[in-house]
Amino acid sequence: MASNLRVDTILPSTGTSLGIGTASGTTTVTGTLNAASATITGNLGVGGVLTYEDVTNVDSVGVITARSGINVSNDIKSADDDFFVYSYKGGSNGQVRSGIQFDSTNQRMEFYTATNERLRIETNGNITAYAGNIIIGTAGKGIDYSAQTASGIAGVTVTSEIFVHYEQGTFTPFLSAASSAPSVSYGAERGGRYTRIGNMVFYSLGLQINSYSGGSGAAYIGGFPYIGAGNPGWDGAHVFRDTAAIGLNSRTNTVGGWIGDTAVAGYPVFYIQSMSNTNNFAAAAVSANSMTTGRLTLHGQYHIG
Protein backbone atom coordinates (compact mmCIF):
# COMPACT_ATOMS: atom_id res chain seq x y z
CA MET A 1 0.00 0.00 0.00
CA ALA A 2 1.46 3.36 -1.00
CA SER A 3 1.85 6.05 1.60
CA ASN A 4 2.67 9.76 1.45
CA LEU A 5 5.07 11.83 3.47
CA ARG A 6 4.31 15.53 3.46
CA VAL A 7 7.00 17.78 4.92
CA ASP A 8 8.29 21.27 4.21
CA THR A 9 11.99 20.58 4.61
CA ILE A 10 14.16 17.46 4.88
CA LEU A 11 17.56 18.00 6.46
CA PRO A 12 20.36 15.51 7.18
CA SER A 13 20.84 14.66 10.83
CA THR A 14 24.57 15.14 10.52
CA GLY A 15 26.79 16.58 7.80
CA THR A 16 25.52 17.98 4.53
CA SER A 17 24.59 14.84 2.55
CA LEU A 18 21.09 13.41 2.28
CA GLY A 19 20.32 9.96 0.84
CA ILE A 20 16.96 9.03 -0.67
CA GLY A 21 16.14 5.49 -1.76
CA THR A 22 18.54 2.60 -2.28
CA ALA A 23 21.54 2.20 -4.55
CA SER A 24 19.57 0.02 -6.96
CA GLY A 25 16.20 1.70 -6.60
CA THR A 26 14.56 4.59 -8.39
CA THR A 27 13.49 7.96 -7.04
CA THR A 28 10.64 9.56 -8.96
CA VAL A 29 9.86 13.28 -8.78
CA THR A 30 6.44 13.97 -10.30
CA GLY A 31 6.57 17.74 -9.95
CA THR A 32 9.38 20.23 -10.51
CA LEU A 33 12.79 19.61 -8.99
CA ASN A 34 14.67 22.80 -8.11
CA ALA A 35 18.27 22.53 -6.97
CA ALA A 36 21.14 24.97 -6.69
CA SER A 37 23.51 22.24 -7.89
CA ALA A 38 23.57 18.51 -8.53
CA THR A 39 26.26 15.89 -8.98
CA ILE A 40 25.35 12.78 -10.97
CA THR A 41 27.99 10.06 -11.01
CA GLY A 42 26.15 7.87 -13.51
CA ASN A 43 24.05 8.63 -16.58
CA LEU A 44 21.27 11.20 -16.82
CA GLY A 45 18.40 10.39 -19.18
CA VAL A 46 16.05 13.18 -20.22
CA GLY A 47 12.93 12.28 -22.18
CA GLY A 48 11.94 15.86 -22.98
CA VAL A 49 13.98 19.00 -23.57
CA LEU A 50 17.10 19.60 -21.50
CA THR A 51 18.02 23.26 -21.10
CA TYR A 52 21.57 23.77 -19.88
CA GLU A 53 24.16 26.52 -19.63
CA ASP A 54 27.97 26.58 -19.38
CA VAL A 55 28.50 22.83 -19.76
CA THR A 56 31.84 21.18 -20.52
CA ASN A 57 30.78 18.02 -22.39
CA VAL A 58 27.54 17.19 -24.19
CA ASP A 59 26.80 13.71 -25.57
CA SER A 60 23.54 14.01 -27.51
CA VAL A 61 21.82 11.31 -29.56
CA GLY A 62 19.44 13.82 -31.15
CA VAL A 63 19.72 17.43 -32.25
CA ILE A 64 21.18 20.11 -29.99
CA THR A 65 19.51 23.50 -30.35
CA ALA A 66 21.61 26.42 -29.11
CA ARG A 67 19.57 29.59 -28.57
CA SER A 68 22.44 32.08 -28.57
CA GLY A 69 25.11 30.39 -30.65
CA ILE A 70 27.93 27.99 -29.82
CA ASN A 71 31.25 29.40 -28.59
CA VAL A 72 34.19 27.02 -28.98
CA SER A 73 37.47 28.03 -27.34
CA ASN A 74 39.40 25.00 -28.60
CA ASP A 75 38.89 22.27 -31.24
CA ILE A 76 35.74 20.61 -32.55
CA LYS A 77 36.49 16.93 -32.83
CA SER A 78 34.61 13.95 -34.27
CA ALA A 79 35.36 10.25 -34.01
CA ASP A 80 33.41 9.67 -37.23
CA ASP A 81 35.25 9.50 -40.56
CA ASP A 82 32.69 11.89 -42.09
CA PHE A 83 31.97 14.96 -39.97
CA PHE A 84 29.22 17.32 -41.19
CA VAL A 85 28.50 20.91 -40.29
CA TYR A 86 25.28 21.81 -42.09
CA SER A 87 22.03 23.70 -42.11
CA TYR A 88 18.77 21.93 -42.97
CA LYS A 89 16.42 24.89 -42.81
CA GLY A 90 13.76 24.36 -45.47
CA GLY A 91 14.40 20.61 -45.52
CA SER A 92 13.81 17.69 -43.22
CA ASN A 93 15.99 16.90 -40.24
CA GLY A 94 19.13 15.16 -41.46
CA GLN A 95 18.83 16.34 -45.07
CA VAL A 96 21.96 18.24 -46.07
CA ARG A 97 20.87 21.61 -47.42
CA SER A 98 24.03 23.71 -47.10
CA GLY A 99 27.17 22.85 -45.20
CA ILE A 100 30.66 21.39 -45.03
CA GLN A 101 31.70 17.75 -44.90
CA PHE A 102 35.09 16.92 -43.37
CA ASP A 103 36.01 13.62 -45.02
CA SER A 104 38.85 12.18 -42.94
CA THR A 105 38.93 8.94 -44.97
CA ASN A 106 39.98 10.81 -48.13
CA GLN A 107 41.50 13.76 -46.26
CA ARG A 108 39.42 16.44 -47.97
CA MET A 109 36.73 19.06 -47.41
CA GLU A 110 33.48 19.18 -49.40
CA PHE A 111 31.18 22.21 -49.56
CA TYR A 112 27.46 21.79 -50.26
CA THR A 113 24.57 24.08 -51.19
CA ALA A 114 21.01 22.92 -51.95
CA THR A 115 22.07 19.30 -51.25
CA ASN A 116 24.71 19.35 -54.04
CA GLU A 117 28.48 19.40 -53.69
CA ARG A 118 29.79 22.67 -55.15
CA LEU A 119 33.44 22.87 -54.10
CA ARG A 120 36.09 20.40 -52.94
CA ILE A 121 39.53 20.92 -51.40
CA GLU A 122 41.68 17.82 -51.85
CA THR A 123 44.41 16.64 -49.51
CA ASN A 124 47.06 17.79 -52.01
CA GLY A 125 45.63 21.34 -52.00
CA ASN A 126 43.82 21.10 -55.35
CA ILE A 127 40.48 22.92 -55.45
CA THR A 128 37.66 21.64 -57.70
CA ALA A 129 34.53 23.67 -58.41
CA TYR A 130 31.66 21.40 -59.53
CA ALA A 131 29.10 24.05 -60.52
CA GLY A 132 29.06 27.77 -61.22
CA ASN A 133 31.94 30.15 -61.87
CA ILE A 134 34.71 31.54 -59.70
CA ILE A 135 33.83 35.23 -59.50
CA ILE A 136 36.36 37.93 -58.64
CA GLY A 137 34.12 40.39 -56.83
CA THR A 138 36.52 43.36 -56.75
CA ALA A 139 37.87 45.10 -59.86
CA GLY A 140 41.65 44.94 -60.19
CA LYS A 141 41.88 41.71 -58.18
CA GLY A 142 42.64 38.33 -59.69
CA ILE A 143 44.88 35.28 -59.44
CA ASP A 144 48.25 35.98 -57.83
CA TYR A 145 51.20 34.13 -59.37
CA SER A 146 53.87 35.79 -57.23
CA ALA A 147 54.93 32.39 -55.82
CA GLN A 148 56.29 31.46 -59.26
CA THR A 149 59.84 32.06 -60.44
CA ALA A 150 59.71 35.26 -62.47
CA SER A 151 62.29 36.36 -65.02
CA GLY A 152 65.63 37.30 -63.54
CA ILE A 153 67.33 38.39 -66.75
CA ALA A 154 69.32 41.61 -66.51
CA GLY A 155 67.33 44.56 -67.83
CA VAL A 156 63.95 42.84 -67.30
CA THR A 157 61.49 44.51 -64.92
CA VAL A 158 58.53 42.42 -63.74
CA THR A 159 55.61 44.82 -63.24
CA SER A 160 52.85 42.40 -62.24
CA GLU A 161 52.23 38.72 -61.50
CA ILE A 162 48.48 39.00 -60.97
CA PHE A 163 46.11 37.76 -63.66
CA VAL A 164 43.28 40.28 -63.48
CA HIS A 165 41.32 40.21 -66.73
CA TYR A 166 39.77 37.84 -69.24
CA GLU A 167 37.15 38.85 -71.80
CA GLN A 168 35.89 37.84 -75.21
CA GLY A 169 33.34 39.38 -77.52
CA THR A 170 32.56 40.96 -80.88
CA PHE A 171 32.76 44.47 -82.31
CA THR A 172 31.60 46.31 -85.43
CA PRO A 173 34.47 47.83 -87.42
CA PHE A 174 34.10 50.80 -89.75
CA LEU A 175 36.30 52.69 -92.19
CA SER A 176 36.90 56.42 -91.72
CA ALA A 177 39.55 59.15 -91.86
CA ALA A 178 41.16 61.63 -89.45
CA SER A 179 40.28 65.00 -91.05
CA SER A 180 36.89 64.32 -92.59
CA ALA A 181 34.87 61.12 -92.78
CA PRO A 182 34.24 59.47 -96.15
CA SER A 183 30.90 58.11 -97.31
CA VAL A 184 31.05 54.32 -97.02
CA SER A 185 28.59 51.49 -97.58
CA TYR A 186 29.29 47.91 -96.49
CA GLY A 187 28.41 44.47 -97.75
CA ALA A 188 27.31 41.45 -95.77
CA GLU A 189 30.81 40.86 -94.46
CA ARG A 190 31.38 43.28 -91.63
CA GLY A 191 32.41 42.20 -88.14
CA GLY A 192 35.17 41.58 -85.65
CA ARG A 193 35.98 39.20 -82.81
CA TYR A 194 38.36 39.73 -79.93
CA THR A 195 39.74 38.12 -76.78
CA ARG A 196 41.39 40.09 -74.02
CA ILE A 197 43.87 38.26 -71.76
CA GLY A 198 45.40 40.51 -69.14
CA ASN A 199 46.49 43.68 -70.97
CA MET A 200 46.69 42.07 -74.40
CA VAL A 201 43.91 42.08 -77.02
CA PHE A 202 43.82 39.47 -79.78
CA TYR A 203 41.46 40.26 -82.66
CA SER A 204 40.37 39.53 -86.22
CA LEU A 205 38.05 41.53 -88.48
CA GLY A 206 36.63 41.64 -91.96
CA LEU A 207 35.06 44.44 -94.05
CA GLN A 208 33.52 44.38 -97.51
CA ILE A 209 33.48 47.94 -98.88
CA ASN A 210 30.72 48.22 -101.48
CA SER A 211 31.06 51.96 -102.10
CA TYR A 212 33.55 54.61 -101.00
CA SER A 213 33.81 58.36 -101.69
CA GLY A 214 35.25 61.51 -100.11
CA GLY A 215 37.13 61.80 -96.85
CA SER A 216 40.50 63.35 -96.07
CA GLY A 217 43.43 62.79 -93.76
CA ALA A 218 44.86 59.52 -92.47
CA ALA A 219 42.60 56.51 -93.08
CA TYR A 220 41.72 54.34 -90.12
CA ILE A 221 39.54 51.42 -89.07
CA GLY A 222 37.48 52.21 -85.98
CA GLY A 223 35.37 50.26 -83.52
CA PHE A 224 38.08 48.32 -81.66
CA PRO A 225 37.25 47.33 -78.05
CA TYR A 226 40.24 49.07 -76.37
CA ILE A 227 42.75 51.82 -77.10
CA GLY A 228 46.37 50.89 -77.68
CA ALA A 229 49.66 51.70 -75.97
CA GLY A 230 50.34 54.55 -78.38
CA ASN A 231 53.77 53.44 -79.52
CA PRO A 232 53.63 52.87 -83.30
CA GLY A 233 55.82 50.00 -84.34
CA TRP A 234 55.83 48.08 -81.07
CA ASP A 235 52.34 48.34 -79.59
CA GLY A 236 51.61 44.93 -81.13
CA ALA A 237 51.52 42.99 -84.37
CA HIS A 238 48.94 43.61 -87.13
CA VAL A 239 48.69 41.62 -90.34
CA PHE A 240 46.47 42.30 -93.37
CA ARG A 241 45.31 39.31 -95.37
CA ASP A 242 43.07 41.10 -97.88
CA THR A 243 43.88 44.69 -98.90
CA ALA A 244 41.73 45.22 -102.00
CA ALA A 245 40.09 48.30 -100.46
CA ILE A 246 43.49 49.95 -99.99
CA GLY A 247 44.33 51.33 -103.42
CA LEU A 248 48.03 50.49 -103.30
CA ASN A 249 50.13 48.03 -105.24
CA SER A 250 50.81 45.24 -102.75
CA ARG A 251 53.91 44.22 -104.69
CA THR A 252 55.67 47.49 -103.89
CA ASN A 253 53.89 48.49 -100.67
CA THR A 254 53.91 46.73 -97.31
CA VAL A 255 50.71 47.53 -95.43
CA GLY A 256 50.45 47.61 -91.64
CA GLY A 257 49.35 49.97 -88.90
CA TRP A 258 48.96 50.65 -85.19
CA ILE A 259 46.23 51.19 -82.58
CA GLY A 260 45.99 54.78 -81.35
CA ASP A 261 46.33 55.63 -77.66
CA THR A 262 43.33 57.98 -77.71
CA ALA A 263 39.79 57.40 -78.93
CA VAL A 264 38.42 59.21 -81.98
CA ALA A 265 34.76 60.20 -81.58
CA GLY A 266 34.58 57.69 -78.75
CA TYR A 267 36.12 54.78 -80.66
CA PRO A 268 39.59 53.18 -80.44
CA VAL A 269 41.03 53.18 -83.97
CA PHE A 270 43.63 51.41 -86.08
CA TYR A 271 45.65 53.79 -88.30
CA ILE A 272 46.50 52.19 -91.65
CA GLN A 273 50.13 52.63 -92.74
CA SER A 274 52.23 51.57 -95.71
CA MET A 275 55.93 51.29 -96.37
CA SER A 276 56.85 52.29 -99.91
CA ASN A 277 60.36 53.70 -99.51
CA THR A 278 62.85 50.91 -100.04
CA ASN A 279 65.74 53.17 -99.04
CA ASN A 280 64.87 53.75 -95.37
CA PHE A 281 61.82 51.49 -94.96
CA ALA A 282 59.89 54.26 -93.18
CA ALA A 283 56.15 53.76 -92.63
CA ALA A 284 53.68 56.47 -93.62
CA ALA A 285 49.95 56.94 -93.08
CA VAL A 286 47.64 55.80 -95.86
CA SER A 287 45.57 58.74 -97.05
CA ALA A 288 41.78 58.58 -97.26
CA ASN A 289 41.94 59.27 -101.00
CA SER A 290 43.88 56.02 -101.48
CA MET A 291 40.96 53.96 -100.20
CA THR A 292 38.50 52.31 -102.58
CA THR A 293 35.98 49.48 -102.76
CA GLY A 294 36.90 45.90 -102.04
CA ARG A 295 37.69 43.62 -99.13
CA LEU A 296 39.73 44.26 -95.98
CA THR A 297 40.66 41.51 -93.53
CA LEU A 298 42.97 42.12 -90.62
CA HIS A 299 44.09 40.21 -87.55
CA GLY A 300 46.60 40.83 -84.81
CA GLN A 301 47.27 41.66 -81.20
CA TYR A 302 48.10 44.79 -79.25
CA HIS A 303 48.90 46.05 -75.78
CA ILE A 304 46.23 48.11 -74.05
CA GLY A 305 47.23 51.67 -73.20
Image: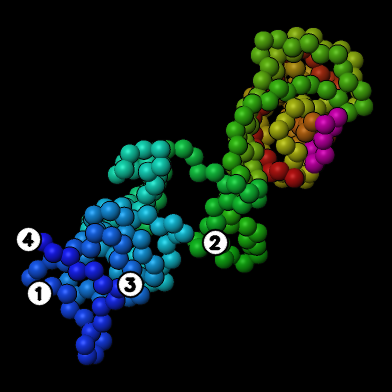
Q: Distance between the residues labelled 4 and 2?
A: 86 Å
* Amino acid type, mark 4: Met
Of marks 3 and 2, the one in the foreground: 3
Quadrant hosting residue 261: top right
Q: Which mark is residue 23?
A: 1
Q: Which three-letter amino acid code belongs to the residue tagged 3?
A: Ala
The quarter of the picture where the C terminus appears is: top right
Tell me which secondary structure the magenta stretch mostly adopts: loop
Q: Which is nearer the eye, 246 or 139?
A: 139
What is the distance, in whole Å, between disc 1 and disc 3 at their CAs?
A: 21 Å
Quarter of the view holding residue 156: bottom right
Bounds of the magenta span?
A: 260-266
> Is 262 included in the stretch rendered in magenta?
yes
Residue visible at 23% across and 84% down? 12
Q: What element carries label 1?
A: loop
Residue type at mark 2 is Ser
Quarter of the image for residue 152 reads: bottom right
**Residue displayed at 17% across by 78% down:** 19
Q: Mark 2 points at which residue?
A: 146
Q: In this view, does 98 lie to the left or right of 207?
A: left
Q: Which of 116 and 296 is in front in this view?
A: 116
- In percent of width and height, residue 281 lies at 77, 39
Residue at x 66%, y 14% (from the top left corner): 189
Task: Check disc 1 and give the amino acid type.
Answer: Ala
Which of the marked residues, 4 or 1, is nearer the chain's N terminus? 4
Calculate the distance from the C-alpha at mark 2 to the C-alpha at mark 1. Answer: 70 Å
Mark 4 lies on residue: 1
